[in-house]
Amino acid sequence: MSSGPEPGPVERHRRLAVDSESVERGLAGLVLTIVELLRQLMERQALRRIDQGDLSDEQIEHLGLTLMALEDRMDELREHFGLSPEDLNIDLGPLGPLLPRE
């Protein structure tokens, strides 16, 4: 029982043709969304530890510089891929946006 003729090479190629630039941008957006979520979680955890007095002044300074460098790198990567901060905030429908506003 055959469901019809197999598509030829040209038809198969048309179905698989995608815009590589939009695929790259979409994948970069997804990866950067995850990195941004983790960055925000790390920042909140750092603030909790600072408030609890768990860190020395040297550790606080190092942590602050590291988080600022990460934020700068995120800005560079977003700019490279033509993404805005809003592009990284996935709408989860009834749950609201993935990334809380800072």
Image: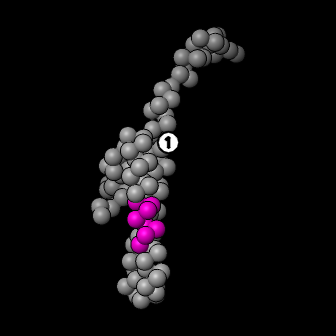
Residue, far left:
101
Q: Quadrant of residue 60?
A: bottom left
Instruction: Give the labeled residue for mark 1.
Output: 27
Per the image, label 1 sits on a secondary structure element best described as helix
- The residue drawn where x is 44% and y is 55% is 73
Label count reads 1
Task: Give the residue at x 42% y 42%.
Answer: 80
- Residues shaded magenta: 64-71
Residue 49 makes an appearance in the image:
no
The answer to whether residue 15 is magenta is: no
Measured as percent of width and height from the top left, residue 86 is found at 32, 49
Residue at 42% of width from left, 89% of height from top? 53
Quadrant (top left/top right/bottom left/bottom right) for the C terminus: bottom left
Residue 12 % position (x, y): 60, 17
In the image: residue 46, left or right of residue 86? right
The quarter in which the N terminus is drawn is top right
- Which one is nearer the viewer's eye here, 97 or 73? 73
Q: How is the image coloured?
A: one colour
Rendered view: 101 above or below 1 = below
Residue situated in front as seen by the camera: 62 or 41:
62
For mark 1, does the 10 Å Cα neighbourhood hold few (<14), some (14 to 19), or many (20 or more) residues?
few
**Magenta-highlighted stretch: main secondary structure?**
helix
Q: Position of residue 34 (x, y in %)?
A: 47, 55
Q: Amino acid at mark 1?
A: Leu
In this view of the protein, can residue 2 be seen by the observer? yes
Instruction: Report the residue that reaches farthest toward the bottom.
Output: 53
Query: In the image, 30: left or right of 90?
Result: right
Out of 2 and 47, give the one closest to the viewer. 47
Q: Percent position (x, y) of residue 92? A: 37, 52
Determine whether 73 is above or below 29 in the image. Answer: below
> Which of the 4 image quadrants contains residue 74?
bottom left
